[in-house]
């Protein structure tokens, strides 16, 4: 993807600044009419400007991400307003041995297919979360995001850490897809919360040609790639 130019960034800043100014003026007028803001208390707004800045920044960031949509191929970025960061791992954890985390269900194929293998240690890594907006199998889903799908893999310890520390991106209503590699082959871990909120995980081969419907609202978790990636 192309980087944003300074001119494009300035355009968005100008539009957002103008909109924020106009919106704030109208908000003050409405609050004044309703006797919420008056000449006696308006100075409080000036004194607490940092609070206003934080609120405005978060609202603008969220809305910019929504407006941009960020649809890539058959998936749509839904985590654009947030930074999701994984801590370094030693590569030793495996999903097959994570029964204390996946208390809802842990697919026995993680062990039967020989996936109980360590991975290389990893440093900090930012992630992105996408949502399926068109029908597709695993090749089409992940292929929307990179020609070399191996670059979209998490290690098993990273997948475990995501489920442990970023539960807000999991749901009882739709599956979350995490691509990983073991023994030179690609697999997809599918995570969902059961009726009690406990994580459960299944595993499929990346080569599986079953088609997921956009109505299933599947979520895809991948590393944030650099322009060089």
Image: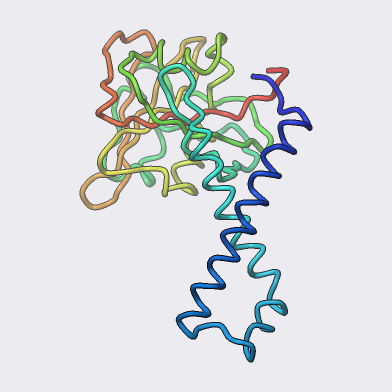
Residue placed furthest toward the bottom: 40
User: Which x, y percent locates residue 11?
Assistant: 70, 37
Judging depth in this view, the residue of 107 and 59 nearest the camera is 59
Residue placed furthest toward the right: 6
* Image quadrant assignment for residue 227: top right
Quadrant containing the C terminus is: top right
Judging depth in this view, the residue of 226 and 156 nearest the camera is 226
157 displayed left or right of 208: right
The residue at the point 71 percent across, 31 percent down is 8
The residue at the point 75 percent across, 38 percent down is 10
Residue placed furthest toward the left: 195
Residue 188 sits above or below residue 96 on the image:
above
Instruction: Give the colouring mode of the picture.
Output: rainbow
Residue 20 sits above or below residue 80 on the image:
below
Judging depth in this view, the residue of 168 and 119 nearest the camera is 168
User: Which x, y percent locates residue 89?
Assistant: 62, 38
196 displayed left or right of 5: left
117 displayed left or right of 188: right
User: Which x, y percent locates residue 84?
Assistant: 57, 43
Residue 81 sits above or below residue 1 on the image:
below
The residue at the point 55 percent across, 9 percent down is 147
């Amino acid at each position: 993807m192309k980087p944003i130019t300074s001119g494009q960034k300035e355009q968005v800043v100008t539009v957002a600044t103008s909109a924020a100014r106009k919106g704030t003026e109208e908000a003050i007028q409405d609050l004044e009419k309703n006797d919420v803001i008056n000449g006696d208390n308006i100075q409080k707004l000036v004194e607490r400007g940092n609070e206003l800045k934080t609120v405005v920044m978060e609202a603008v960031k969220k809305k910019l991400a929504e407006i941009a949509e960020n649809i890539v191929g058959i998936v749509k970025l839904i985590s654009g307003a947030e930074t999701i960061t994984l801590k370094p791992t030693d590569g030793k954890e495996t999903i097959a041995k994570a029964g204390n985390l996946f208390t809802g269900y842990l697919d026995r194929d993680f062990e039967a297919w020989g996936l109980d293998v360590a991975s290389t240690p990893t440093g900090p890594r930012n992630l992105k979360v996408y949502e399926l907006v068109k029908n597709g199998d695993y090749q089409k889903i992940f292929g929307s995001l990179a020609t070399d799908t191996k670059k979209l893999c998490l290690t098993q310890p990273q997948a475990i850490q995501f489920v442990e520390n970023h539960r807000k991106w999991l749901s009882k209503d739709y599956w979350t897809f995490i691509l990983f590699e073991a023994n030179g082959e690609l697999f997809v871990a599918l995570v969902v919360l059961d009726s009690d909120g406990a994580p459960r995980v299944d595993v499929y081969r990346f080569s599986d040609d079953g088609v997921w419907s956009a109505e299933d609202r599947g979520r895809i978790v991948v590393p944030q790639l650099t322009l060089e990636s």
